[in-house]
Image: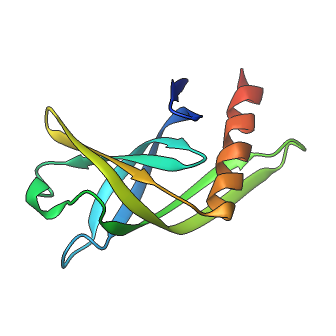
Amino acid sequence: MGISSRRRYERLEVSIPCSVSGLKEFDVLCKIRDISEAGIGLCISKKRYFSRNIKRGELITVAFEDSYISGLGEKCSVSFDVDAKVAFIQEEDEFFIVGCEINDPEYFHYVVFKKKSEENKS
């Protein structure tokens, strides 16, 4: 895991299993590859999904569970069903990289605490 800079917020590289709904008639299992306070990057296998079904500007729901260590040293578990707007779709080898914008205060705070948790590991 690492932190990279893109746009206004630093993005934290992660690998979190998730489910995406709102992509036509079915849910898609995929991975979250990076997070920031205002967005999320998804990695979707081409074998599981076809790009023609993903549209820029489309609203989707990303469901995932994660945990981090708080500043007090306690393990915090979170579960999200967060609404996201597809900002871009990029093809990479056997995957689609889908960048989404998220405007949710609870998600924002989760990312802030997750980043602090990762910094404290170093």
Q: Position of residue 93 (x, y in %)?
A: 14, 32
Quarter of image, res 58: bottom left
Q: Is residue 14 visible?
A: yes
Residue nearest the observer in this picture, 100 or 67? 100
Whether residue 48 sits left or right of residue 116 in the image: it is: left
Please report the residue visible at 76 percent of the width from the left and 50 percent of the height from the top. Answer: 75
Residue nearest the observer in this picture, 120 or 50? 50
Q: Position of residue 70 (x, y in %)?
A: 81, 46
Please report the residue visible at 73 percent of the width from the left and 45 percent of the height from the top. Answer: 113
Please report the residue visible at 74 percent of the width from the left and 55 percent of the height from the top. Answer: 76
Q: Position of residue 42 (x, y in %)?
A: 35, 48
Residue nearest the observer in this picture, 15 or 98? 98
Residue nearest the observer in this picture, 67 or 111? 111
Please report the residue visible at 40 percent of the width from the left and 52 percent of the height from the top. Answer: 100
Q: Quadrant of the C terminus?
A: top right
Q: Is residue 26 above or below residue 15?
A: below
Whether residue 23 sits left or right of residue 73 in the image: it is: left
